Each structure stands twice: as C-alpha cells, then as structure tokens.
Image: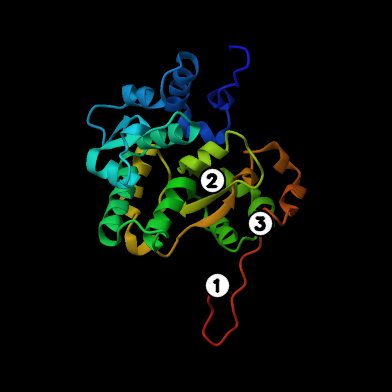
Amino acid sequence: MAAGLAPSPFGAIDWATPWLDPWRGAGEPLARKVLQGGCAVHAVLQVATSEGGPVGFAPPQDLPDGIAYEQFIFDTGRVPTRDNLHDFFNGLVWQQFPQTKQRLNQLQAQAIAADGVQAVRGPLRDALTVFDENGALLSAPPALWAALRARDWRRLFVDLRPLWREARLVLFGHALLEKLVFPRKPITAHVYQAQAAIDSVASLDAWLAQSLQPERLVTKPFVPLPVLGIPGWWPGNENFSFYDDSLVFRSAPRKSNHTMGSAVL
C-alpha cells in the first residue's frame, strides 16, 4: 500500500462471519478482485454477471441528473454503481436474488409512475426501501417467532436458545451487510418471515419474489431483530447479560388506550 493511503474497506470484510456464509462463495472472489486489482466495482460486477441476468452494472455518472435511481434501472436494466461497500453489496444481492431485486425495482417504478418522486416516500416505497436496505429472511420454529414478535428477548435468546439450531436467518439488505463489515451491537435487521424452509438462496429468491405483494408490504410486515444477539453469531452473547441492554433490546411499543382504538404508539 502506498504511504499515506487509507486501507480499503474491502479488506475489512471478514468472510468467515456466520452472516456472510450465504454470500461467501460469490462475494469473496469479487471483493478480492476489487481489493487486489484496483478495479472499479461496477466493472468487477459486470464481468461476473451471468448472461441473461436482469441487469448490468454501470458507472455512477451514467445516471442522468433529474432521473430517479430506481426509474433508471427499470428503464435501462443498468445499475449505477459507486466504488464503495454499499454498492458492492447491492450488486452482490442483485446477483444472488435477481428475481426479488427485479420485483422490488418493478414495484418502485410503478409507484413512481403513479405518484411521482416526492419529498416523502409513500407507504409502499417506504416499505420497499426498508426491506431493500435492511431486510432479512427468517425461517424459525413458531415459538421463536412468537417471542420475536413480542420482543421478549430473554425468552427468544436465552430460554429458547436450543431452538435456534432449527432456525436460519439470511440477510438481504445491502446496507445491513455493509454495516456488519464493522459489527456493532445495535445493528438491527427488519425481518420478514420465510414461510418454508430455506433450502437454497435460489429457492428463497423465487419464493420471495412472489411473496412481495403491495397490499402486504404497506402493512410493514417486518420485525426488528438485533442480529448480533443470534446464538453463534457473536461471542459476547454467550454471556446472557448481553441482552440486558435496553437501548438495543427494546420492549414492544405500548398500545394506546384512547377511545379511538388500539393504535400502536
């Protein structure tokens, strides 16, 4: 490394972490090419993209001023990609979950066509963005799901700890993957329930693309999960006091007792 140059963040990716297990095979060689070859991220992704894939990858300056990012992808089939971890992981998700990413982009474009680009996203675009950036898929026994929805963290991670051997969490959001390059206890995924066992990324992709329907997405069907609390994902959680941090493992919101009903505060 030349004197005075900061180390590349691509060198900080620890592909041995459990959350990167589904991504290691495809992602590690690409990150190595970026790190060792000084190649632009969009070029590395483009070379690795299979023929017939839903999108290609382009330098960021190809996105014209005044055109929404999602609309440009929908219109051209090209993803503007910067030389950073955020866009690298986005490209990796496009490669591993092509059907789902295409479905998310289609729904974004439809919402833009209907409502235009506004200062505040509507409920559908907001839900799409939340999942695209920070989503994860969890297949788990019903007891774990009940404890997660109740945000009963002690039951979820301590009392039911053996049940996590029957669960599988696959991270989807590219911002989530980026943040976990430098792990911190508060990092939280927005979890979507996988209705079937997660046998492979390809089967998960096919199911998820069909599952993401606008009428369901607008209900925000996601549950917050601090991912470093998962047994086996972080050494610190072997000491159960890890879960006593109320700033991270927060209680479920209380429900209003007003006569207007039981809206969540």
Q: Residue at x 34, y 54 (%)?
A: 211
Amino acid type at image mark 1 = Val
- By what rule are the colours in the image chosen? rainbow
Q: CA distance from mark 2 to mark 1?
A: 31 Å
Look at the numbered disc 1 and give the secondary structure of its residue.
loop
Q: Which residue is mark 1?
A: 264
| Residue 230 sits in quarter | top right
Position of 240 relative to 142 (above/below): above
In the rendered image, which quarter contains the N terminus?
Answer: top right
**Do callouts 3 and 1 mark residues in contact (Cβ within 8 Å)?**
no
Q: Amino acid at mark 2?
A: Glu
Quarter holding the C terminus is bottom right
For the residue labelled by badge 2, is the local secondary structure a helix, a strand or a loop?
helix
* Disc 2 from disc 3: Cα separation: 18 Å
Determine whether 170 is above or below 160 in the image. above
Q: Nearer the viewer, residue 14 or 156?
A: 14
Is 157 on the left-hand or right-hand side of 28? Answer: right
Q: Position of residue 145 (x, y in %)?
A: 54, 57
Residue that label 3 marks: 153
Q: Which circle, 3 or 1, is nearer the viewer?
A: 1
Between discs 3 and 1, the one toward the N terminus: 3
**Image depth: mark 2 or mark 1 in front:** 1
Tag on residue 166?
Answer: 2
Q: Residues within 10 Å of mark 1 (few under 14, many from 20)?
A: few
Q: Amino acid at mark 3?
A: Trp
Residue 76 seen in render? yes
Above-or-below relation of 232 to 186: above
View extreme (top): residue: 2
